[in-house]
């Protein structure tokens, strides 16, 4: 959502704008909003009959994952949606989603802590022994 607030992504953007390898077989119609609302048309998870590991293999599976429903027609909670959103964040930020999220949360917490402490003069005991105000 932070990328949307910054104008880097729109809810109506097609996912293939950010992950062109997903083109074909109806996946061109999937939007960011459909991923967020679990209406993209994916199954709940990748087929787990075959054993596989790693980021590269997950991306190969994502690029060829068939749709179970036409995008926007049916709600199905899907981990594949979040894997896809994570890859969008990765490609826009240049870092893995977990690292981007950690940085954003730290920055948000820092701003919230200092804004509240200044307004309400709240004593933040977990910050009392720090040499710097920047969050860990």
Image: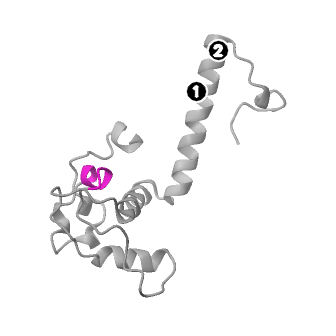
Residue designated by label 1:
112
Which one is in front, 75 or 46? 75
Q: Position of residue 24 (x, y in %)?
A: 17, 74
- Quadrant of the rendering where the N terminus is positioned: top left
Q: Position of residue 46 (x, y in %)?
A: 37, 75
**What residue sits 42% from the left and 59% below the top?**
86
Is 40 situated left or right of 1 in this image?
left
Instruction: Magenta stretch: give its range.
Output: 32-38
**What residue sits 18% from the left and 67% below the top?**
69
Asked if residue 73 is positioned above or below residue 10 in the image, the reply reads below
**What secondary structure do most residues of the magenta stretch adopt?**
helix
Residue designated by label 2:
118
Asked if residue 89 is positioned above or below residue 23 in the image, the reply reads above
Q: Position of residue 22 (x, y in %)?
A: 26, 71
Asked if residue 32 is positioned above or below residue 108 in the image, the reply reads below
Mark 2 neighbour density, 10 Å: few (under 14) some (14–19) many (20 or more): few
Image quadrant assignment for residue 71: bottom left
Is 111 situated left or right of 71 in this image?
right
Image quadrant assignment for residue 111: top right
Is 57 situated left or right of 135 in this image?
left
Q: Earlier in the sequence, mark 1 or mark 2?
A: 1
| CA gap, disc 1 and disc 2 | 10 Å
């Amino acid at each position: 959502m932070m990328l949307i607030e910054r104008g880097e992504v729109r809810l109506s953007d097609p996912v293939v704008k950010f992950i062109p390898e997903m083109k074909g077989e109806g996946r061109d119609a999937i939007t960011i909003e459909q991923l967020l609302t679990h209406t993209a048309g994916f199954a709940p998870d990748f087929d787990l009959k075959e054993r596989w590991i790693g980021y590269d293999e997950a991306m190969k599976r994502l690029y060829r994952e068939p749709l179970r429903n036409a995008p926007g027609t049916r709600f199905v909670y899907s981990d594949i949606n979040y894997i896809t959103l994570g890859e969008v964040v990765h490609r826009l930020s240049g870092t893995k989603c977990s690292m981007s999220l950690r940085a954003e949360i730290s920055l948000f917490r820092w701003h919230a802590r200092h804004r509240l402490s200044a307004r309400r003069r709240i004593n933040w005991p977990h910050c009392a022994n720090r040499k710097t105000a920047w969050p860990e």
